[in-house]
Image: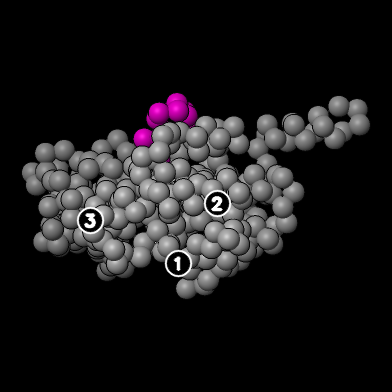
Amino acid sequence: MQDQINRFLEYLEAEKGYSNNTLAAYQNDLNQFLIFLQQLPPDERPRGWGNVTRDHIVSYILEMKEREYASSTVARKVAAVKSFFKFLENTGHITSSPAKDMETPRAEKHLPATIPAEEVDRLLAAPSGNSPSSLRDRAMLELLYATGLRVSELVALNVDDVNLEDGVVRCVGKGNKERVLPIYDRAREALAAYINEGRPKLLGEHNDEPALFLNRRGTRLTRQGLWLIIKRYVQEVGIKENVTPHTLRHSFATHMLRGGADLRAVQQMLGHANISTTQIYTQVTPDHMREVYDETHPRA
């Protein structure tokens, strides 16, 4: 797969006359995408560029957003991937580009995508029954909304990171910074049910597996696996908005602040190094502005 990247870079240099700096940027962006693909679980890892799907690219975008890349950086890296697949299609290396008609993420800053609390309730109630996977999914969704964890932080959790008695979860975020987060009672109950009843059945013979959330093979669940699980439940409950694992993080922060939470406290819970990153959640939508106006203006 590296050979095709090298040929693309040669094409950009010889045919397009791109500068060394531009070529270096393309090389860095495409190598990062290749490393992402190579680190996927064996049953999800494409054997060649012709096996890369649209979902692979979407998952890559979600990972970059999860790592809180600047929107301009995400836009540039996705544009590089799209150009590369267009080259592969034009040169006959693949029959059709998986990035065809895919919109490049906008570089402008927007309000974080959230969903109303009522739709969060519907989503969290979606995993029904007491099967091991249902218990796991219910615990994951509750924990995401209870804490605002990044997806990478959630899948990296080990059983020992959960203290059910105190109702807290310990996680290690960006820059290896540790934080301890409180969880509400419903999330604690969902975690207890999963740990006591669901996880042992998923674990099977993997008795030495420390991961909290497991896949059907009894090993650590991946970011890609979590995204597919959430995508399925969103479709089941009929939520029209585009919901990703990061949407629950955004919704957690927005709902906390609208409920009166202190900005500094939300910053600490989200694990933001700079409060300016958290301040984006204080922006209001026109609908919310109207709601506040109607409720507070003496002549409204």
Residue 28 percent location from the top left of the image: 29, 65
Q: Is residue 187 above or below residue 232?
A: below
Give SS at disc 3. Answer: loop
Residue that extends furthest to the bottom in the rendered view of this protein: 176
Q: Specify the principal SS of the magenta part.
A: helix
Can you identify the residue that label 1 sits on? 160
Q: Is residue 116 above or below residue 136?
A: above
Mark sitting on residue 188: 2
In magenta, the rendered stretch is 230-242
Front-lying residue, 289 or 29: 289
Residue shown at 45% from the left, 26% from the top: 238
> Which corner quadrant holds the C terminus?
top right
Residue that extends furthest to the right in the rendered view of this protein: 298
Of label 3 and label 1, which has the lower sequence position? 3
Please name the colour scheme applied to the rendered image: one colour
**Residue 174 belongs to the span the image colors magenta:** no
| Inter-mark Cα distance, 1 to 2 | 14 Å
Which dot, 3 or 1, sits closer to the camera? 1
Residue 164 percent location from the top left of the image: 54, 59
Q: Residues within 10 Å of mark 2 (few under 14, many from 20)?
A: many
Mark sitting on residue 34: none
Residue 146 percent location from the top left of the image: 57, 50
Of label 3 and label 2, which has the lower sequence position? 3
Front-lying residue, 149 or 24: 149
